[in-house]
Amino acid sequence: MDAERTVRIVLTRLEIDIHNVHGDTRLREDLAVDSTELVEIAVALEQAAPVTIGTDQILAARTFADLISCVENAPRR
C-alpha cells in the first residue's frame, strides 16, 4: 500500500479535505482525532490492504506522517 492510497483512505474515514493535511499535521491537536477514531482508522486500513496494524502502533502515531509510516511498516498478511 503506498502513502497516497493511505492518505485517501484515512481522509475518507475522517471526512477531511486532502488540502488541509500535510505530513506534519498532528492527528489529535490539528485534526481532533481521538484514540477510538485511531482504532477505527486502523480497522479501515486493515480492510483496505493486506496489513496488520497493532493498537499500540496506531495509538503511537502523533502526526499524519507517523500514521503513513505505521501503515507502510505494518506486517503484511
Image (tube, rainbow, N blue to C red):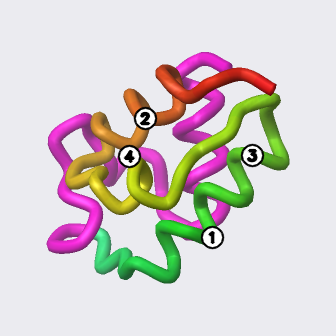
Mark 1 — residue? 40
Residue at 36 percent across and 62 percent down: it is 59
The Cα–Cα distance between marks 1 and 4, rounded to whole angstroms, is 22 Å
Residue carrying label 3:
46
- Of label 2 and label 4, which has the lower sequence position? 4
Mark 2 Cα within 10 Å, few/some/many (few <14, many 20+)? some
Q: What residue type is labelled 3?
A: Glu
Of the 4 image quadrants, the one containing the C terminus is top right
Res. 39 image quadrant: bottom right
- Residue in view at x 48 percent, y 22 percent: 73
- How far from the left and from the top, in percent, is residue 30? 19, 68
Residue 24 sits in quarter? top left
12 vs 57: above or below: below
Q: Disc 3 vs disc 4: which is toward the camera?
A: 3
Report which residue position mark 2 lands on. 70
Mark 1 element type = helix
Mark 4: which amino acid? His
